[in-house]
Image (spheres, helix red, strand yellow):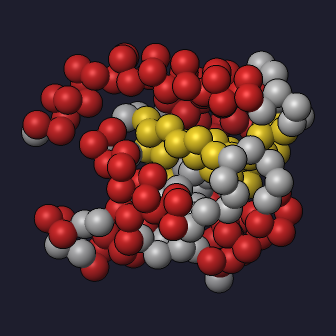
């Protein structure tokens, strides 16, 4: 309950903070014409299987195992690009998430954004698209742990309208099977 109250109260400030930081990251990478934007959970990390086996009080976001084939694919194709990680996680998990990224780094030129609502990812994608092309990996799925995978359908529809190279759930699943 406490985490939810923090999320609601701080979300507008967090959104502005990350937007300012993202603008700086974009500026220092202005010589690149493309950015790689990556989700973490169930895209780079095998999160739902990890969470399913853990007691909720003993979750360590810094220890979630990789989806190795996704990481290998990205390193092979896009390792030279600046990376923006955008993950739907509570801001209180920022430090652990950053540790996970540093431990499993694709390249050092990266920036992490945590969003409290999946739809907030569109705000940042549009910000990047103002100046750069985007290659985007995101499963945009949820509910794995309950046996039926569901999708953020409206977000997927919006992303498909954007001028983005998009790697989706099916691509990621096929890559890692």
How far from the left and from the top, in percent, is residue 44?
Answer: 58, 64
Please say if 148 is above or below 96.
below
Q: Residue furthest bottom?
A: 177
Kindly tell me whether residue 167 is visible in this rendering: yes
Give me the residue at 53% from left, 42% from top: 112
Please say if 98 is above or below 3.
below
Instruction: Return the residue nearer the eye: 33 or 177.
Output: 33
Give me the residue at 75% from left, 63% from top: 74
Q: Is residue 26 left or right of residue 140?
A: right
Q: Residue furthest left?
A: 1
The quadrant holding residue 14 is top left
Q: Is residue 145 left or right of residue 110?
A: left
The quadrant holding residue 5 is top left
Q: How many marks?
A: 0
How far from the left and from the top, in percent, is residue 78?
Answer: 82, 57
Kindly tell me whether residue 152 is visible in this rendering: no
The quarter of the rendered structure image containing the C terminus is bottom right
The quadrant holding residue 30 is top right
Please say if 38 is above or below 49.
above
How far from the left and from the top, in percent, is residue 79?
Answer: 79, 59
Instruction: Return the residue nearer the eye: 73 or 107.
Output: 107
The quarter of the rendered structure image containing the N terminus is top left
Give me the residue at 51% from left, 67% from top: 103
Please say if 174 is above or below 168.
below
Q: Is residue 33 left or right of residue 123?
A: right
């Amino acid at each position: 309950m406490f985490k939810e109250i923090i999320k609601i109260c701080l979300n507008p400030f967090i959104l502005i903070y990350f937007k300012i930081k993202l603008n700086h990251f974009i500026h220092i990478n202005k010589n690149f014409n493309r950015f790689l934007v990556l989700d973490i959970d169930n895209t780079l990390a095998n999160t739902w299987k990890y969470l399913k086996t853990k007691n909720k009080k003993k979750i360590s976001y810094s220890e979630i195992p990789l989806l190795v084939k996704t990481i290998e694919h990205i390193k092979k194709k896009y390792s030279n690009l600046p990376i923006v990680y955008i993950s739907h996680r509570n801001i209180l998990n920022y430090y652990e998430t950053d540790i996970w990224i540093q431990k499993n780094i694709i390249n050092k030129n990266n920036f992490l954004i945590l969003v409290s609502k999946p739809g907030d990812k569109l705000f940042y994608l549009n910000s990047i698209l103002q100046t750069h092309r985007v290659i985007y990996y995101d499963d945009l799925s949820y509910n794995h742990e309950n046996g039926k995978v569901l999708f953020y359908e409206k977000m997927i529809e919006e992303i498909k309208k954007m001028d983005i190279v998009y790697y989706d759930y099916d691509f990621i699943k096929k890559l890692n099977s």
